[in-house]
Amino acid sequence: MLRIYGDSNSGNCLKVKWVAEKLGRPFEWVEIDIMKGESRTPEYLAINPWGQVPAVVLEDGRPLAQSNAIMLHLAEGSDLIPADAYQRAQMFEWLFWEQYSHEPTIAVARFRVRYQGQAVADLDPTLVAKGAAALKRMDDHLAGRAFLAGGALSLADIALVAYTRMADEGGFDLSLYPNVQRWIGGVERALGL
Amino acid sequence: MLRIYGDSNSGNCLKVKWVAEKLGRPFEWVEIDIMKGESRTPEYLAINPWGQVPAVVLEDGRPLAQSNAIMLHLAEGSDLIPADAYQRAQMFEWLFWEQYSHEPTIAVARFRVRYQGQAVADLDPTLVAKGAAALKRMDDHLAGRAFLAGGALSLADIALVAYTRMADEGGFDLSLYPNVQRWIGGVERALGL
């Protein structure tokens, strides 16, 4: 059976869980508490030399890391990946943007507030501004759209919703982004969250 | 004809150029000087609302952004993407890792030194440590390997070589990473650089 190593508080890990659930693929969840250093043990590094969560061990015993790479592998051939080449490329735009511009701002702000005890008012203003710009970018794009790419639920929505729905925990006011709020609701319904 | 909007000093832009060249796909290069704000003009934002380079306009007039998303689209069906599903997933591991862990350290250190005039000795020690860890991770993986994924040149190598071969400009000593040095030479030869 597919084995997912993840921290239940990590959006990156939840992405993989949601894709497996949506696809009806049976899996075993192995909880890795990153705050206790469990992603840095020799046993874990043997599975994922990057020392990050999530990682999976596939049914045939081969390991795989990087949340978006895992999602792409699990979802191959499913309707979570647009069949049209250009729409698929648009999904990839969002997946790479998520890792470069969204996670390092929205998720990092949440981490500092929720896990490191920093006050929202004390967050690095550059980080906050970049996070707000990321949410604005999504809000602009989602005007008149139900999903980010290809007109239907795709991995882009699953990747982006993970930390966006928790953005308030990092001090971001989602009511400023009504298209994002509507989209979160739609993706949550599609995933049965 | 394919039009590539890029800054010749940006590794992210060179990736796209190299893929087009390797595939023999004719293109027109439009130089965008990010230091002069040319990626923030209304004309450019109409092509790429993210305001980043590179971006392309495909032969049919449709735009696409995000360097790795563009590479994937251009290279679809070519041998720059492993045919085997697991090897393809391994290529994706490196592509996402590049945007999350490599570019924000190796390329950012170079940018601060080369374009913002910061002395190497004054670079943020955390940034330097993370960059060194990224190079070490690549060096460990490349022991006994000619390429990062799938046993042949893939988009993973093209994505990673772009800034790795310029890492010395950010103060990193590549002679500490002999497998990386050998790999850079191999990828450069494969790309005719």
Image (cartoon, coloured by chain):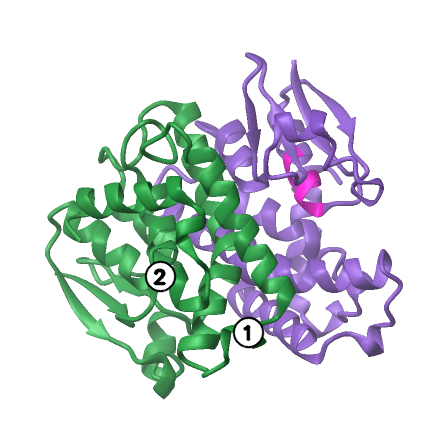
Chain colours: A green, B purple
Q: Where is residue A135 shown, x and y percent of the image?
A: 48, 49
Which residue carries the number 2 mark? A166
Residue drawn at x 46%, y 34% is: A141
Residue farthest front in this picture: A175
Q: Is residue B114 above or below residue A191?
A: below
Q: Where is residue A155 shown, x and y percent of the image?
A: 32, 43
**Relative side of A71 to B173, left or right:** left
Residue drawn at x 39%, y 67% is: A169
- The question of residue B50 being in magenta is answered with no
SS assignment at label 2: loop
Residues B177 and B20: in front is: B20
Q: Look at the image and give the residue range highlighted in magenta.
A: B11-16
Q: Is residue A61 above or below residue A138?
A: below
Which residue carries the number 1 mark? A121
Residues B192 and A68: in front is: A68
**Chain letter, disc 2 residue:** A
Disc on res. A67? none
**Chain letter, disc 1 residue:** A
Q: Is residue A92 above or below residue B167?
A: above
Q: Where is residue B187 shown, x and y percent of the image?
A: 65, 47
SS assignment at label 1: helix
| Disc 1/disc 2 C-alpha distance (Å) | 18 Å
**Residue A41 shows up from this direction:** no
Which mark lies nearer to you, 1 or 2?
1
Residue drawn at x 58%, y 14% is: B61
Callout 1, which amino acid? Ala
**Relative side of B188 to A155, left or right:** right
Callout 2, which amino acid? Met
- The question of residue B12 being in magenta is answered with yes
Residues A101 and B148: in front is: A101
